[in-house]
Amino acid sequence: MLPPLVDTHVHLNFDVFTPDLAEIAQHWRDAGVVALVHSCVEPSEFTAIQAIAQQFPEVYFAVGLHPLDAAQWQPDYQSHIHELARSDSKVVAIGEMGLDFFKADNIETQTRVFWSQLEIAQALDLPVIIHCRDAAATMRDLLEKFWQTQGAVRGVMHCWGGTPEETQWFLDLGFYISFSGTVTFKNAHGIKAAAQIVPVDRLLIETDCPFLAPVPKRGEKRNEPSYVQYVAQHVSELRNISVMDLGQQTTQNAAKLFGLAIREQIYV
């Protein structure tokens, strides 16, 4: 029997999936994936992602602007993302959003765009999907400032690659932590250690497909949602629990954070 799994971060609208998306969907169903959260890099993707969510009932999605695209931000983007998020009940988050100081150094722009999207999420009572690369300390400080001046926000640190110390910063702020295929990589010692300290009720898994295929699929050019089973297996081994328990708990966590309808279907 396969455990129920939720892939909490996918990019199925990319061209690499266009030829065989229906087949890919059958793969994830065969692997026990009961729900997926489709992330958004920029608002212009909304229509394409919405069509995928309409085609596959188990796909939910987000809307937002990725930090590496922060320079595209226009004065009307805040209201535009707000209205898009309100326009479809399958929108379950704002994002992906955040900070990336590995590939870009426009810190002020990224910070301003990130803050604006936090405001949208708070106004709509939606969680945020946060991308954070080489920016953990700045991210922590920004989130703490937002809490102090605007109030609480909830969400997930996606495709987490931080140290255990950095992980604890975001756990203390109430965030969920999601691990991708990087946790299966041989030399990812810090990520593996982080996966062992996250409380069981704050743990999520993802593929971030089509990127970062996990071991034993790492050599493949295209990651896909069905491969979240390998992330689940590896994290369960790190935590010394069964993959069934890991799958059930992370599915429950995803349902709680994102308000997914699968909660009633699985846990009755």
Image (spheres, helix red, strand yellow):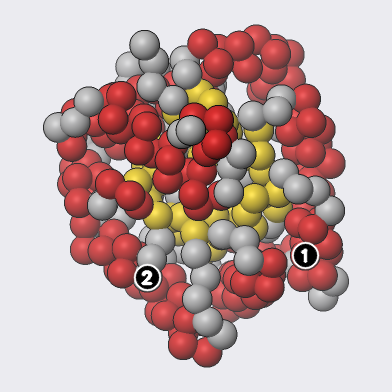
Residue furthest toward the bottom?
Answer: 149
Amino acid residing under circle 1: His
Looking at the picture, does residue 207 appear above or below residue 109? Answer: above
In the rendered view, does 241 fall on the left or right side of 248? left
Number of numbered discs: 2
Asked if residue 34 shows in the view, the reply is: yes
Badge 2 vs badge 1, beta-carbon distance below 8 Å: no
In the rendered view, does 42 fall on the left or right side of 34? right
Quarter of the N terminus within the rendering: top left
Looking at the picture, does residue 232 appear above or below residue 263? Answer: above
Residue, x 35% and y 52% (percent of image)? 202
In the foreground, 105 or 77: 77
Residue 72: image x %, image y %? 75, 63
Residue, x 63% and y 66% (percent of image)? 125
Tell me which label, 2 or 1, sits earlier in the chain.
Answer: 1
Dot 2 lies on which element? loop
Looking at the picture, does residue 53 appear above or below residue 253? Answer: above
From the image, tell me which residue sits under label 1. Answer: 82
Amino acid residing under circle 2: Leu
Image quadrant where residue 93 sits: bottom right
Residue 24: image x %, image y %? 61, 15
Q: Residues within 10 Å of mark 1 (few under 14, many from 20)?
A: some
Residue, x 68% and y 73% (percent of image)? 123
In the foreground, 102 or 39: 39
Residue 135: image x %, image y %? 41, 66
Q: Which mark is residue 173?
A: 2
Asked if residue 14 shows in the view, the reply is: no
Q: Residues within 10 Å of mark 2 (few under 14, many from 20)?
A: some
Dot 1 lies on which element? helix
Residue 99: image x %, image y %? 51, 64
The Cα–Cα distance between marks 2 and 1, rounded to whole angstroms, is 24 Å
